[in-house]
Amino acid sequence: MCSSTPRNSRTGRPRSIEADTAILEATRAALVDLGWSKLTMGDVAGRAGVAKTTLYRRWANKNELVVDAVAVLFDELELPDLGSLQADIEHVVLQFAALLERPETKTALMAVVAESTRDAPLRERIRASIVDRQKRLVLDGRRRAQLRGELPSDRDPVAVDATDDLIFDVIAGAVVHRALVSAEPVDGEWVTRLSALLVGGLGAVAALGL
Amino acid sequence: MCSSTPRNSRTGRPRSIEADTAILEATRAALVDLGWSKLTMGDVAGRAGVAKTTLYRRWANKNELVVDAVAVLFDELELPDLGSLQADIEHVVLQFAALLERPETKTALMAVVAESTRDAPLRERIRASIVDRQKRLVLDGRRRAQLRGELPSDRDPVAVDATDDLIFDVIAGAVVHRALVSAEPVDGEWVTRLSALLVGGLGAVAALGL
DNA sequence: AGAGTTACGCTACGACCTGTAGCGAAAGGC
DNA sequence: GCCTTTCGCTACAGGTCGTAGCGTAACTCT
């Protein structure tokens, strides 16, 4: 969770866990009030009731701090078994859309992704703490659909991985694009169309036999 | 193209068009060298051989400047008739992916989208100069597919618009997510899967009868 | 209890970027 | 030639970054 490893030494004054949580909470609050570009380390420190130097002892820069502050929000994502592939898809899409509606994620997610294009460690941090969490939902959804017989069992494992990657990019990308670029609501009707497109198209992809 | 309207007065010294193009070109070069976060107005002015005040006379801030600098790159997007819906989709996806491979677009596009979540005029600027240009390709592609008989003719115009919006968000979103978030190559195999998913799923969406 | 170690809050600082103002000079139209 | 607008240049106040130094607080080990 924290950036710089505080040397697993047992001696000395331990780091304040309360400060950690206060800083991350203050970061989210600052994102809501100020947005990404106007958020400053000094402001976050003030909100958290912490010295600015304390922030720099834990996080090297604004990007890593914001990733950690936003990452915990993605813990909410869950995939209850609703009985059909289409219902599962619609549920997770609505969940993801609700997450993107929150101002702290809306303003921060694209900003850190933009920075990650020139910062490999940051990209890895995003992948580990945010992207992988979402991707697991896709894997679970496919597994359940196979158990129900809605999707054929695995043949070529390479093709299965590729299809999982495709589905993940399509779902996550479409929702993000709809919410942030097109700036249109991700409502029930749109989700119905998207899930119909996916369920209907999955058969065609499987028929490729790649 | 330019931000502040220079008062359509015929009198007085006219604005240097060379300065405009030099500034936009310098902005793209600075994006390649420095990325989004480290790009400064002073640096761009220096590269363009122009005073910093000249930049502020044309663009109010970094965001609007970068949008204009990147927007012209999207003029390259074209949709030649390749004879089938699937071929058309694959071609435009590969074009879009090639555009996202360029470091200036890769680093700038998500950054301005992130800023636009808190800046309605900027969002409108992006929509007019970038998003609409892409969306027209979707409309052209559907029209051609209808002429070929690959897709049914329009019944409910509202449903048709909604489907166009869906297809656009799915294609653009999936490509961006694949290239920038997953950071995996948009190669021929992936594009084949995506287009198969779309072509196969479109029938299911139409069958919704919404 | 005392020594050792580490984190903390605070202040100060140089470097940098922002966005604006004022100036004289240049480049057009009338 | 006069008027208008833009140009380059310099200077400036305001804000942010990230670091250094200091004394103090908290915790562990002997």
Image (spheres, coloured by chain):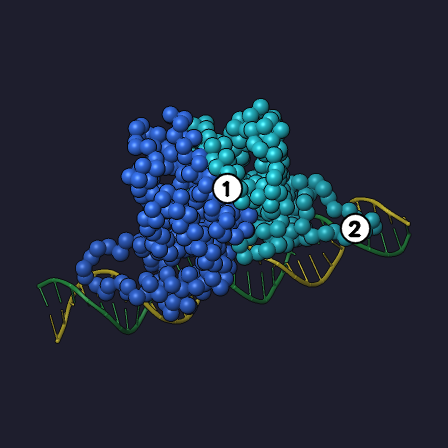
Chain colours: A blue, B cyan, C yellow, D green
The quadrant of the image that shows the N terminus of chain B is: top right
Badge 2 amino acid: Asn
Q: What residue do we see at 61% from left, 37% from top?
A: B154
User: In this rendering, does residue A153 appear at all?
Assistant: yes
Distance CA(mark 1)–CA(mark 2): 52 Å
Look at 41% across and 34% down and name the residue there.
A202
Image depth: mark 1 or mark 2 in front = 1
Q: Is residue B91 visible?
A: no
Position of A83 relative to A54 (above/below): above
Image mark for residue B208 = 1
Residue B60 appears in which quarter of the rendering? bottom right
- Picture quadrant where residue A69 is located: bottom left
Q: Label 1: chain? A: B
Q: Amino acid at mark 1?
A: Leu
Q: Tell me the residue that label 2 is attached to.
A: B8
Residue B150 on image: x %, y %: 56, 29
Q: Residue furthest top?
A: B83
Relative placement, left or right, of B53 versus A16 is: right
Tell which subunit mark 2 falls on: B
Is disc 2 placed on a helix, strand or loop?
Answer: loop
The local crowd at label 2, few if under 14, some if 14 to 19, many if 20 or more residues have their Cα within 10 Å, is few
Residue drawn 38% across and 37% down? A165
Q: Position of residue B139 (x, y in %)?
A: 61, 37
Whole-percent x and y of residue B145?
Answer: 58, 30
Q: Which is more N-terminal, label 2 or label 1?
A: 2
